[in-house]
Amino acid sequence: MSNWIKNYTGIFWLIGGIIIGSIAGLIFGKSVEVVKPIGDIFLNLLFVAVIPLVFFCIASAIANIQSGQTLSRILSIMSGVFLGTVIVAALLTIVAMWLFPVHQQLAAASAAATQSTGKSLSGDQITQLFTTGEFFQLLSRKNMLAMIIFALLIGFGALKAGEKGHVFVQFLDAGNEVFKQVFILIMKLGPVGLGAYFAYQVAVFGPSLFGTYAHIMGVGYGVSLFYYVVFFSIYAFIAGGIKGIRTYWRNNIIPSATAVGTCSSIATIPANLDAAKKMGVPDIINSVTISLGATLHKDGSSISSILKMAVVFALFGRSFNSPEVILLALGMTVLVSIVEGGIPNGGYVGELLFISVYGFPPEALPPAIIVGTLIDPVATLLNATGDTVAAMMIAKFADGKNWAGAGNK
């Protein structure tokens, strides 16, 4: 119990700050606007730190790829399975949000957000979305997607440089570690910053906000648990038929308990490695899939990402059902699911990314953070336990019907 409390301390502090802020907003009304600058300072620190953090994280990860680790066939199959399950989770959540839409709007703020709505992306807008004309413009959070693409190029450039680029790779590694620690320090202000901001929101927009968050949590947990039971069973059936389903759930109890107890995909790796072995996954596929899946395969984060987008769109009075919006959402969800695994509190990076791409004002960040915090336990459950069923499918696609979990060996 003490370990469980320790692992969830960060979430407890954030929720505690939000609850205290909400009570203050209800009691003191608009007079709590005096604390709004505290929330603004917290948001500004996040905006400033996230650009170098993401740059160093991505560039460092790419630059440190070792050619001997390619295992091309397994990795290509693994990429397809990871990508497919993340997109399925996102699409399921989008359908759920269409069936159970969020109606609450922040009318006062919607005007600021609607300036970039209602029009299809032009050629110039697409160009500005993926690139910038000047290097310094990459440092703006408004050009975050362009910065991510540039970071990928830098990482591959450092990788291609070989020994001559060794010192630069060390610089990328050091920058990655430094800005991880900076982000951790900033997030220690989260309970105070979010508490102040939520006090302001409740005071200005009223307690009806609670119904909005309750609604999104109901949809989020419902979709997540449905995906956990139904779709993981479908994936296990694809891997090994009825026997695959029995094998998966018989060996998934300990990983599930570990994921919920630790709230960490990384901490669940040992349990997943043992479970996948018992499921009959070959050792080479087991070690590669479980290790990489802990950081690259995030079905729960995919669901969380769509939920955060949907609630922000609703709060700012924007439609979340056009093909253009959906395609961008799917692309960013895949990107976030890959990127956030190597970053402390990496979900916030995804929030900053979609706020930037869709042109929302900074006020859109606190609602997204709140949704991400509340959905985090069940998202971690899906992130962690989805790796073992993915390993089963990879074994099936790599070894065919003769893999051990299919009962033919």
Image (tube, helix red, strand yellow):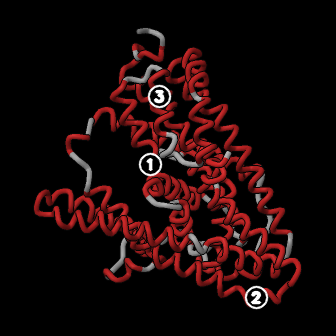
Q: Which residue is rendered at x = 36% and y = 77% of the image? A: 132
Q: Which image quarter is the C terminus in?
A: top left
x, y percentage for residue 121? 50, 69
- Is label 3 in contact with label 2 (beta carbons under 8 Å)? no
Q: How many marks?
A: 3
User: Mark 2: which amino acid?
Assistant: Glu
> Which element carries disc 2, helix, strand or loop?
helix
Q: Is residue 93 visible?
A: no
User: Mark 1: which amino acid?
Assistant: Thr
- Is label 2 in contact with label 1 (beta carbons under 8 Å)? no
The residue carrying pointer 1 sits among few (fewer than 14), some (14 to 19) or many (20 or more) residues within 10 Å by Cα, namely some
Q: Which residue is rendered at x = 62% and y = 61% of the image? A: 10
Tell me the distance, in whole angstroms, between the alpha carbons under discs 3 and 2: 53 Å
Residue holding disc 1: 295
Q: Is residue 365 visible?
A: yes
> Which element carries disc 3, helix, strand or loop?
helix
Quadrant location of residue 241? top right
Residue holding disc 3: 274
x, y percentage for residue 85? 52, 40
Q: Is residue 255 left or right of residue 397?
A: right
Foreground: 220 or 317? Answer: 220
Residue holding disc 2: 33
